[in-house]
Image (cartoon, grey):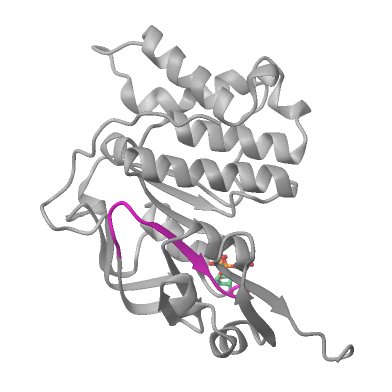
């Protein structure tokens, strides 16, 4: 997989976090998921949100991606309140892959990926060969070149997931939010996607915030892990700081050993089965 060059970030106030939640309350109808939450996402880091099902990871990611408005407090992008920015300005800075993206009907893979270029287009700036190049690179980076002309309705779950990731890449945003990007993918393709995310982060300095369920892969491919649960941040730090038996017990009700992964040196989570001592 190849890396893709991005446009530089335009909205950065000096010293500002890439994204910052300030006193944020996130709620659905009457259910409050987070109250008065403060959280900074640093520029140029890969940050992964982990936590049990229903702990609020997607809710937090949606707030950072402006898909969910806080009922109190504010979310800032490069030091400016998200709510003060127009949709195109946000889309040039921030690309988000939601947990369940709605795939438009009768759309080829290439057309879907091309939508990633929309934030860069205007009446004065129509489609150019450079846009086609970015789309082709995004298709190649996700292994979809051969499937470019297929209707998205005919793809397998994993192929469709990769097409959505290609769309996010084509957007060339300096901040990328990915909600469970490895869903539906076999282990080889999971590793491909996470290595691609890592290379985009390292080679063009993209800030990445992901939600992952596989704790070992989260530790291997992240600079920072944030564990959420019961309406708060349970732990926040480097993979070795966060992935401790105590945190795993508290956040997941999981008994596990944490040992160095012989392949990467990152923490390897080994669940303990109480029925097989
Ligand atoms: N649109 C919605 N309306 C009402 N409640 C919601 C909505 N979306 C999520 N919730 C609730 O908010 C809580 C947090 O959900 P969220 O999807 O953020 O959790 P998550 O940590 O991402 O979970 P999972 O690991 O299962 O994907 C859950 O109790 C969920 O039922």
Which corner quadrant holds the N terminus? Answer: top right
Q: Specify the quarter for ligand 1.
A: bottom right
Which residue corresponds to the image point at 59% horizontal and 54% vertical from the top-left? 180
Q: Position of residue 75 (x, y in %)?
A: 28, 61
Outermost front residue: 262
Whether the magenta-drawn stretch holds residue 248 is answered as no
**Range covered by the magenta-colored residues:** 41-54
Q: Position of residue 238 (x, y in %)?
A: 42, 71
Q: In this picture, is 84 found above or below 240? A: above
State left or right for residue 61 relative to residue 217.
left
State left or right for residue 26 relative to residue 147.
left
Q: In this picture, is 79 found above or below 169? A: below
Which residue corresponds to the image point at 73% horizontal and 79% vertical from the top-left? 271
Outermost right residue: 276
Judge whether residue 148 can be spotted in this image. Answer: yes
Q: Position of residue 80 (x, y in %)?
A: 17, 53
- The answer to which image quadrant residue 74 occupies is bottom left
State left or right for residue 31 relative to residue 191.
left
Q: In this picture, is 277 found above or below 76? A: below
């Amino acid at each position: 997989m190849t890396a893709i060059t991005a446009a530089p970030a335009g909205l950065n106030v000096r010293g500002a976090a890439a994204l910052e939640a300030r006193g944020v309350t996130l709620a659905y109808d009457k259910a409050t998921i987070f109250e008065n939450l403060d959280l900074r996402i640093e520029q140029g880091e890969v940050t992964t949100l982990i936590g049990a099902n229903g702990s609020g990871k997607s809710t937090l990611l949606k707030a950072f991606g402006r898909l969910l408005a806080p009922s109190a407090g504010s979310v800032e992008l490069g030091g400016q309140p998200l709510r003060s920015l127009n949709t195109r300005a946000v889309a040039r800075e921030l690309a988000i892959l939601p947990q369940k993206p709605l795939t438009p009907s009768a759309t080829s893979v290439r057309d879907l990926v091309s939508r990633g270029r929309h934030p860069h287009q205007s009446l004065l700036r129509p489609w150019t060969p450079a846009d086609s190049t970015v789309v082709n690179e995004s298709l190649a980076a996700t292994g979809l070149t051969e499937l470019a002309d297929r209707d998205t309705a005919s793809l397998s779950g994993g192929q469709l997931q990769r097409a959505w990731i290609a769309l996010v890449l084509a957007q060339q945003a300096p901040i990328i939010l990915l909600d469970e990007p490895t869903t539906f993918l076999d282990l080889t393709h999971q590793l491909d996607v996470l290595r691609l995310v890592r290379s985009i982060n390292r080679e063009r300095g993209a800030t990445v915030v992901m939600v992952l369920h596989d704790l070992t892969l989260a530790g291997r491919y992240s600079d920072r892990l944030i564990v959420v649960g019961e309406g708060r941040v349970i732990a926040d730090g480097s993979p070795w700081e966060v992935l401790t038996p105590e945190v795993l017990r508290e956040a997941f009700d999981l008994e596990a050993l944490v040992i160095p992964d012989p392949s990467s040196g990152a923490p390897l989570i080994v669940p303990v089965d109480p029925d097989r001592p």
